[in-house]
Amino acid sequence: MAKKLFRALALLVVPFIASLLIRLLYATNKKKFHSPYSVSDEPIIFACWHGELLMLPYLYAKYRKIPHAKVLISSHFDGMLISKTIKYFGLGTIAGSTNRNATRVLIQGISAIKDGYDIGITPDGPKGPRHEVADGVIAIAQKTKAKIVLVKMEPTKYWQLNSWDKFTIPKPFGVLNYYATAPIDVSGMDVVSAKNLIKEGLLKHEK
């Protein structure tokens, strides 16, 4: 009972505080965008590593002034916290993962793109292995013919959690370096080649 009450309270309070923290960190850092000026108006799959997703709503906002996206988020408790946090930035969610309930999640992702939504996905989420691309992002892209934009954020000053994904939190008064590729088409590629292309693209600016 106590655990349920704690979780209910956390779901009320933590996402709001987290959204304020994200806004504060963004405001107190310089920003540099190393990315295309624009991407297609067609629905896009935006992909980033799980450990780098904290500040990426602002990169998405560079391309979509009015947010129209759904992010694939784990249905676990930590995923629920993330889901409620990103709602403060106008982003919807699809609960589940491409490891568990894979078919249902993939169907929802495909349906969302067909309904005109962009999709956000962490190819190594929700539980890793870190920096290894799962099949889900390829399956959604090939079923819908949607292009993939690889995105990442590298801060010059940061904390890094001792978690499986080495989750990165920028410190104030540094520089947030945002990277994005031009849209990538994997529709005619075999799965292994497509996964390697995505992995190489997301590791390109790795320290």
Image: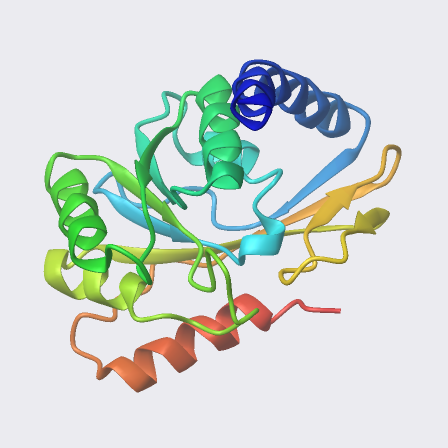
Residue 90: % across, % down: 41, 20
Which of the pair 107/201 is nearer the observer?
107
Number of numbered callouts drawn? 0
What colour scheme has been applied to the protein in the rendered image? rainbow
Residue 118: % across, % down: 28, 40
Residue 48: % across, % down: 49, 55
Q: Is residue 125 above or below residue 66?
A: below
The quarter holding residue 193 reads bottom left
Which of the pair 38/112 is nearer the observer?
112
Say which residue appears at 13% left-offset and 56% top-offset. 144
Say which residue appears at 42% left-offset and 71% top-offset. 133
32 sits to left or right of 48? right
Q: Is residue 25 above or below residue 133?
A: above
Say which residue appears at 50% left-offset and 70% top-offset. 201
Say which residue appears at 56% left-offset and 46% top-offset. 53
Q: Residue furthest front?
A: 1
205 sits to left or right of 128? right
Picture quarter with the C terminus: bottom right
98 sits to left or right of 30? left
Residue 166: % across, % down: 70, 59
Which of the pair 75/112 is nearer the observer?
75
Which of the pair 189/31 is nearer the observer?
189
Q: Is residue 124 above or below residue 90?
A: below
The quarter holding residue 174 reads top right
